[in-house]
Amino acid sequence: MQEFFMDYGLWLLAALLVVIALVFLLSGKKKTDAPAEPVAPVAVPPAPVTAAPVPLMAEPAVVVPVASVPAEPAPAPVEPVPVEPTPEPAPVVDPAPVVDPAPAAEAAPAPAPASPAVTTPAADGDDLLKLKGVGPKLKALLIELGVTRFAQIAAWTDSDVALIDAKLGNFKGRPVRDQWIDQAKYLAAGDLAGFEAKYGKL
């Protein structure tokens, strides 16, 4: 018996310790797996409301009378020192502007040079409108050129016709085309019948 405990006692003790350890571990695990009990919320008392301090009425300021200070005497007026006026510089006179000579007015058509065909206009000139092809404008232009009588036109030479024709502007060529010289010969001679027979009634 003693030998049995000597041979197996240590083994039994070791096995017993292992069983105790397992039991202890299992019981500890069950305690840890148990759900924790809910903790009741702790009620926090509301913070006390403190009223804002009421500002005290400011005490009225005390006005301390200030002793009147005698005013300083006004300084004596300073007499102005006379200043000699500086002479004003002489005004600069601009030179007289150079005025360009006025452009010469367009000269009216110069009257034709004196010839038997062109003379000074007469106050009682003939009615040049009787000439076929002569209207009011052309009549006025002929009078400006000094042509006022049928006798003048009847006495025109080729040079006279060229001289007058060059001054007729838009009416250039009319003396030759309308045969003014031939018409004027009839009218200057008073041959109205011959004029009407050739050029039509007046």
Image (spheres, grey):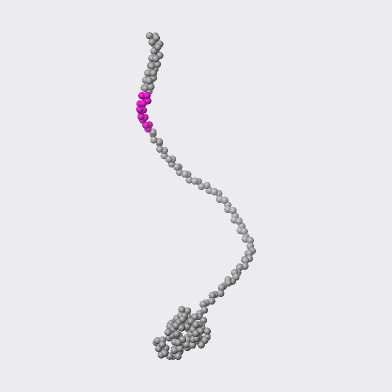
* Residue under the point 42% across and 84% down: 132
Residue 144 to residue 62: above or below? below
The quarter in which the C terminus is drawn is bottom left
Residue 8 visible, this angle = yes
Residue 121 visible to an observer of this rendering: no
Q: Which residue is drawn at the image coordinates 47% and 86% (left, top)?
A: 153
Residue 31, x across and y down, in percent: 36, 24
Residue 39 painted magenta:
yes
Residue 157 in the image, given as x and y percentages of width and height: 50, 86
Give the extent of the magenta segment.
Answer: 29-43
Looking at the picture, how far across and down is residue 119, in whole percent? 51, 86
Q: Residue 65 at x, y = what percent?
A: 53, 48
Image quarter for residue 55?
top left
The N terminus sits in image quarter? top left
Q: In this view, does 38 lie above or below 99?
A: above
Of residues 107 and 85, which is closer to you in this image? Answer: 107
